[in-house]
Amino acid sequence: MSVAKPKADTLDAFFEACIGVVGPRHFLQDADAVKPYGRDWSGAYFRTPLAVALPSSTAEVSDLVRLCAGHGIPVVPAGGRTGLCGGSVPMRERAALVMSLERMTAIREMDRVGRTVTVEAGCILETLQDAVAEAGLAFPLMFGAKGSCMIGGALSTNAGGSNVLRYGNARDLCLGIEAVMPDGTVVNGLSALRKDNTGYDLRNLLIGAEGTLGIITAATLKTLPQPLVRTTAFLSVSDLDAALTVLHRVQDHTGGAVEAFEFMPQPVIDAICTYNPAIRSPLEGPAEIGILLEVASSRPMDAQLNEEGARALEVDVLTLLADLVEKELILDATIARNDQQRQDLWTMREMVLEGITHAGVAEIFDISLSLKHLSSFVATAKEQAARFGFRSLVIGHLGDGNLHYAVMGAEGQDPADLPMDAMRAAIMDEVARLNGSFSAEHGIGQSKLDQMLRYKDAGQLAVMRRIKSALDPQNLMNPGKLIPLASTEVGTGRSWQP
């Protein structure tokens, strides 16, 4: 396969011009220096960048993008590189400049009155959350990579996480963005307004576009009242239908205060405990269907202590859970009595990926379904996996219908010897039959181009291609991601070209 690469003299001129924008210290060309920028967290994709530019401002991003457009050099935006789909990694077929926004970390404005925060794209999620907390507020986007992922990447992939059930995805928490378009034009849409009907919604066009239409450089985000009290519990139920009944009962009882409703069956818990023996199963007996439940409240009355030192919210939730145990909707339950016990439960949840990877998982699907279809899908998918010689594990954010469906070879069976493509197609066909999504929160990147072509509505895909052609006619902005080639190219792992 040939690799498109600029001529040496053109490339030298381009590099010199880039150095003129960011300075020699912030333009990396050494092989060892650029190597980390050629892969993401998954490790499944690797391509050494032509170079890595580290701009410190939107103006520098704009200048660099203009240079890329003028020299015909593709540009790949990068942040914390915590993705799993190769979205921040250059394509093997096309050499590219990686533009990392890691130096753009400023919190430009904290508006306590309007309850918004304006932050640059390179700010790490956890850093932002800590700063917002100091102001007595909260930014609730929450997932395992919070200590290394950056806001620009979270918006570009419309990241989800464990509390989408209550607060929504990254898109739902964003009021406005600033971005650099493929020709270098700066779009300043940092509006903090809740109501602004003045034309096309460019914010939502760029959120979730994975850097294929422009580079997000800053965002104005919503902040919310900081929870005063949380109650966390681990439950065992008989099946998924019972779990969803419990979810609705708790939601109804608390007025929609459930922040997390995470699904972890016993085999997943066993895999975590095997991987890290310091972690112990939260229940004495097995939890065929284990649920991590968290309820949060910002109401002072829910934080009040009774004579025994228990918070009102804890007493209320405990009373409800006891009633559900009596009704046999819950088989067993334990409640976190202090911060350490709560942290222990969340540590277990956040170690799921490491645990199941250590157990030999060959592939993890990131799917979403209507809640009414979850139970039937899990049963059918298990049968389909077994038909091709695979075992399956199911975990996920049960409250919002997002399942991470994992498969591994049967006992003693190497997954490489099994028909992975046929099994994958069977499971994805079932997701499509149920009107679900093959990509719930991880994005498309390079890994799901074939699925995008097979399952995405043809009309929507055609419109996406027209938008891409209009805004990025040279296809220089993160090429090879999100938009697949025509049907004749299915299976190549390549993306559409204009």
Image: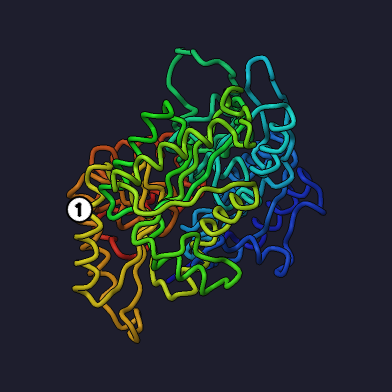
**Residue in front for this viewpoint, 463 or 344:** 344
- Residue 286 in the image, given as x and y percentages of width and height: 39, 65
Image quadrant where residue 238 sits: bottom left
Report whether 94 appears left or right of 31: left
- Residue 101 in the image, given as x and y percentages of width and height: 67, 45
Q: Residue at x 69, y 20 (%)?
A: 111
Q: Amino acid at mark 1?
A: Ser
Q: Which residue of the protein is positioned furthest toward the front in this rendering?
A: 307
Instruction: Name the residue tied to disc 1.
Output: 376
- Residue 139 in the image, given as x and y percentages of width and height: 60, 33
Q: Which residue of the protein is positioned furthest toward the bottom in this rendering?
A: 412
Q: Note whether residue 158 is visible.
A: no
Report whether 243 appears left or right of 143: left
| Pointer 1 local density, CA inside 10 Å: few below 14, some 14–19, many at least 20 | few
- Residue 352 in the image, given as x and y percentages of width and height: 49, 62
**Residue in front for this viewpoint, 237 or 58:** 237
Residue 120 vs 419, above or below: the answer is above
Report whether 272 appears left or right of 61: left
Residue 202 vs 494, above or below: the answer is above
Q: Residue at x 36, y 29 (%)?
A: 252
At numbered mark 1, what does the secondary structure look like: helix, strand or loop? helix
